[in-house]
Image (tube, helix red, strand yellow):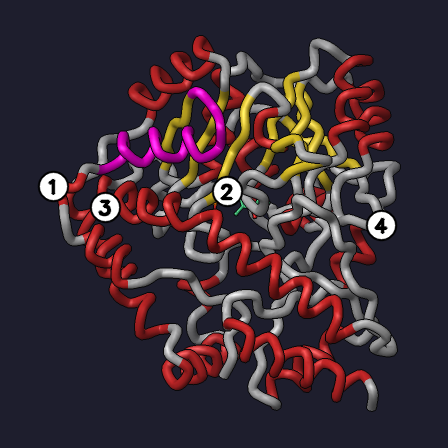
Amino acid sequence: MIPRLKPALGARELLAALAPWRGGVEEFEAAFAREMGQRHAVAFPYGRTGLALLLEALGLRGAHVVCPAYTCVVVPHAVVASGNEPVFADSRDHDFNMDLELAARAVRRSGAQALVATSLFGYPVDLDALDELRARHPELRVVQDCAHSFAAEWKGRPVQREGDAAIFGLNISKLMTSVFGGMVTTDDGALAERLRALRAQRVAPARWTKSLRRLAYLAAVYPAFHPVVYGVVNRLERSGALDRFVRYYDEGVIAMPADYLDAITPLEGRVGTVQVARYRGLVERRRRLAAFYDQALAGTPGLRLPPAVPGATYSHYVPRVEDRAGVLEGALRRGVQLGELIEYCVPQMRSYSARGASAGDAFPVASRLSRTTINLPLSAGPRGARRAAAVLRELLNG
Ligand SMILES: *Cc1c(COP(=O)(O)O)cnc(C)c1O
């Protein structure tokens, strides 16, 4: 079976994991900062841990923080964990990102003190619109969520540098990975200092048992993505037998993982350092596959293709269909697993609507996106992409 994602982990990452003398977290931070063109990078066990402590380092508590309605739910979870309150803004239809006009309105209405600007699926945030918003609200703290968009560019400007700081997620489903882990980058030396101090105070040092668990996890990733093994795992997953391991959120609960304040391990740092060196190549590969899909799928009835934006990193290639369940099922029967990430509109989830997140507000675009987006494999190579495109055309041409 062709999996919807396959981490780009090779022998080099495994060897680095097994070589403690090759450094750890500090080396990873230095390499990451250099690659992102930023002065400081501070590593965390998860991207969401980085966001929660960053908001605290920015001096925010009891503040409103504007977030996209259509984003990974761990982002508002981190806002809540930091003692702040998310306020949601609907998306733009054409590139999935938060509508910054609506975000500006949310800032004025709620008196929000910060905003999380996400380059979703790798589509760079509209920095012209963001500049305008920041000019009108100079006090507003801006955090770039680059979990899908390491070094994505808007008209040649890297998004991660346009704000107070940027956060990155590094689990195995991301563009590059350190097994788990997250990063915060900034050019603000004083902010980086405060963030490091907070980390020293709040995040417990990594114990060797955690390194061992991470090694076991990493070692399991290699065979898990073998086509035969993956087919079996997928069947178990669909039966619900693996829910305890694979579900990353619960519709009704706002929570952080139990280990979100246990430091990232040196082993993860070493894997991350290898991935940083490979990053530009990994993104180029995704861009080529996205261009291939654009061409191969043009004109397919009932399929709305994603925009082609120069500077996008294509963490996901995301067309839209009306009958998503039917398409996912049909593709799976033909040996291709399509993704449906992100399949929810955050303010309409039980946990957030119960907090009054969507009170008096509608999120028509985010809501539609949550029901119609699918994503195609970008990590199965050209052959996997050709197969996925052929299957999708076959399904939709009836
Ligand atoms: C993955 C992700 C994050 C961070 O995720 P962690 O699992 O906490 O590392 C943040 N924002 C978005 C949009 C993401 O997809």
Q: Secondary structure at mark 1?
A: helix
Q: Is residue 382 above or below residue 375?
A: below
Q: Amino acid at mark 4?
A: Asp
Q: Are marks 1 and 3 in contact (CB under 8 Å)?
A: no
Q: Label 3: which residue?
A: 267
Q: How far is the residue under mark 2 from the one under mark 3? A: 26 Å
Name the quadrant of the C terminus: bottom right
Q: Label 1: which residue?
A: 21
Decide which of 267, 154 is in the foreground and name it.
154
Q: Depth-wise, is mark 4 or mark 1 nearer the camera?
A: 1
The picture places residue 365, in percent across and down from the top left corner, at 84, 50
Residue 86 seen in the figure: yes
First in sequence, mark 1 or 3: give its number: 1
User: For the point 57% across and 16% down, which residue is it?
Assistant: 60
Q: Amino acid at mark 3?
A: Leu
Q: Label 2: which residue?
A: 255
Residue 348 seen in the figure: no
Q: Depth-wise, is mark 4 or mark 2 nearer the camera?
A: 4
Q: Depth-wise, is mark 2 or mark 3 nearer the camera?
A: 3
The picture places residue 187, in percent across and down from the top left corner, at 50, 17
Q: Are marks 2 and 1 in contact (CB under 8 Å)?
A: no
First in sequence, mark 2 or 3: give its number: 2
Left or right, residue 102 beside residue 74: right
Q: In terms of image quadrants, where is residue 217?
A: bottom left
Q: Depth-wise, is mark 2 or mark 1 nearer the camera?
A: 1
Q: Amino acid at mark 2?
A: Ala
Q: Secondary structure at mark 2?
A: loop
